[in-house]
Image: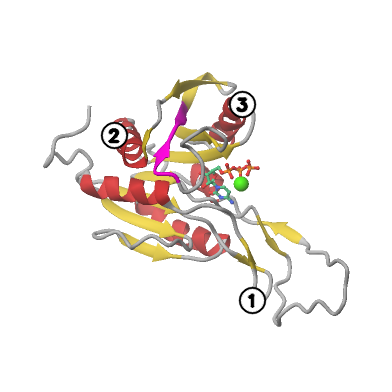
Amino acid sequence: DRPRDGVRPLAGLEVLVTAGPTQEPLDPVRYLTNHSTGKMGYAIAEAARDLGARVVLVSGPVALPAPEGVDLVRVTTAQEMFDAVRDAFPGADVTVMAAAVGDFRVAEVEPDKIKKHGRDAIELRLVANPDILAWAGAHRRANGSQTLCGFAMETRDLEANAAAKLAAKRCDMLVANDLREPGAGFGTDTNAVTVLTPGDAPDKPHAERWQLMGKREVAERLLLRLAAMR
Ligand code: CTP
Ligand code: CA
């Protein structure tokens, strides 16, 4: 069911995508981050472009080239990603948040390099970052014309954890993958996802297990689904 070349099923739509990790500074030299490479999010942005959409890609620091024909907004921290999403979200018809956002940042970033001074241990106090996807779920247009998709990477209880996120963040779709599944970890070109959509009750979403496929194909299938939900 892939569209033929030249068919542009997302023409006229604006698609907002978040991708990559965030970096949360400790001091001018160091930061907290995660293993996200941005491949899934960039595949979604490129697929959306090729399906005819106007695309805003809000990206944390990644090693991938800037996709052509996409409005790329580069950010570093979760707070910067939040600010960029707040700007773009009101105009977005379809939003897909594939970024691995740092849940916590250092309460006070040291202005100078932290010195070890012969200490055996130091303590870092971390405070919560804003949940960007949850904010979007709570700030949709009143007429229901925006569709919202989140991602979740889990190491256990995949369906239960993903179902909780689908409901708590008020998404139309939650795409979950298991970090330990072959072909579905960080930096892979493939993904094996379980796609959740709201069901009859919040604790009973509809879950569909997709076979292992390229991230680009996952991206196209998700986007066509999301566009059809509008
Ligand atoms: N997300 C976000 N802002 C955050 C944290 C997460 O927008 N501060 C988004 C991610 O981009 C993803 C979804 O929320 O689309 C789920 O992220 P995940 O880290 O799996 O879920 P959390 O709610 O942060 O729960 P936990 O990390 O504890 O599993
Ligand atoms: Ca998280």
Q: Residue furthest left?
A: 6
**Label 1, label 2: how far apart the Cα atoms are:** 42 Å
Q: Tell me: 213 left or right of 158.
A: left
Q: Which amino acid does label 2 sit on?
A: Leu
Residue at (74%, 60%) from the top-left corner?
A: 126
Where 94 falls versus 83 (above or below)?
A: above
**Label 1, label 3: how far apart the Cα atoms are:** 38 Å
Mark number displayed over residue 29? 1
Pointer 1 and pointer 3: residues touching (CB < 8 Å)?
no
Instruction: Count residues near mark 3 (Cα–Cα under 10 Å), then give few for <14, some for 14-19, many for 20+.
Output: few
Dot 1: element: loop
Toward which corner of the image does residue 143 lie, by quadrant?
top left
**Which segment did they paint magenta?**
188-196
Q: Which of marks 1 and 3 is in front?
A: 1
**Along the line of sight, which residue is nearer the eye, 15 or 191?**
191
Task: Report x, y in % for residue 130.
Answer: 61, 54
Mark number displayed over residue 224? 2
Q: Which amino acid does label 1 sit on?
A: Val
Q: Which quadrant is home to the C terminus?
A: top left
